Every structure is written in structure tokens, then in C-alpha cells.
Image (cartoon, grey):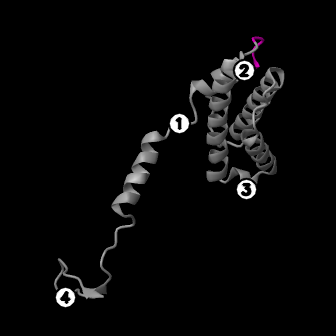
Amino acid sequence: MTAATTLRPGWSHPVRAAVPPFTEAGLRKILEKVQRWTPYVDGLLLDDVAAVLDDYTPTEHEIEEHTQRLRGHLLRLVHLAVVSRVAETDQQTAVLVERARTIRSEEVPTDHRRAVGHIRRMAWMLDELLERLVARQCLTEAP
């Protein structure tokens, strides 16, 4: 411990030297994460859900794109539910979070019909989780 110089005369007591919370590499890593971050509430979420649940059946090429987008939306909503602690206080939200994690991690079937079914289940899961988060006032309104 070292004695700190003070602006007020007569006040001197031992203090620890300041230690920055992160190294330069740690700060760069955090900056990169912040720069890659995208908001979870945007019109794209509902557009992506609608595109998958529409009467139009996505082609094999479109399945991969829809899968990645829906997985991203699921990830953001799950993080929101966990960070806001809604998943801890609401059993129904906790169940939806677990289902969302499960469906997000599943492999997309190679059969086209089954792949379409899979992304549609992901879209329904997104819709259910979004509605629950709005009902629990985790989000003020649907995007």
C-alpha cells in the first residue's frame, strides 16, 4: 500500500494502486464484441418468421440462409430472457428458453421437406418466445 496524495490537506490514508480491470488485449476483445453486436429488436425478426411461415416453400438454397438468421434471432432472445432474469422467475419462459436452445442446436435435416419443417419449428419457437417476453414485459412491444 502506498500513501496517496490528496487535494485536501490533512487527509492521507493508505490506498491501493489502481489496477485496470482488463489488459489491452482484453479491452480489444470487448471492443470487437461490441462492434459485432446487433440489436435483437428489429423488423427483421418478424420478417424472417413471416418468410418461413408463409405459404411459399423455401428452396434448398434458401433453407441455409433462413436457418442462420433464425438461429441468430433465437440466440438474442434467449440471451435477453436469461440476462433480464425472466427465465429464472417465470417457469413458462424457462421452458421456452430450453426448447429454443434445443431446436437452435439441432442439425438441419438433409431431406428438403424435413429441413422446411425444421425451420418452421424454429420460426414458431421464435414467435412463442417473443410473445412470452412481451407478456412478461421484458420487451415493451413486439418489433
Dot 3 falls on a residue whose secondary structure is helix
The image's mark for residue 52 is 2
Of the numbered discs 1 and 4, the one sitting upstream in the chain is 4
Residue indicated by mark 4: 10
Q: Residue at x 68, y 29 (%)?
A: 67
Q: Amino acid at mark 3?
A: Glu
| Residues under numbered marks 2 and 4 in contact, where contact means CB atoms less than 8 Å apart | no
Label 1 – label 4 distance at C-alpha: 51 Å
Quarter holding the C terminus is: top right
The image's mark for residue 39 is 1
Q: Amino acid at mark 1?
A: Pro
Residue 88 picture quarter: bottom right
Front residue of 129 and 54: 54
Rendered location of residue 43, percent (x, y): 58, 24
Rendered location of residue 137, percent (x, y): 67, 42
Dot 2 falls on a residue whose secondary structure is helix
Span highlighted in magenta in the image = 52-56
Q: Residue at x 75, y 37 (%)?
A: 107
Q: Residue at x 72, y 51 (%)?
A: 87
Which tag is nearer the camera, tag 1 or tag 2? Answer: 2
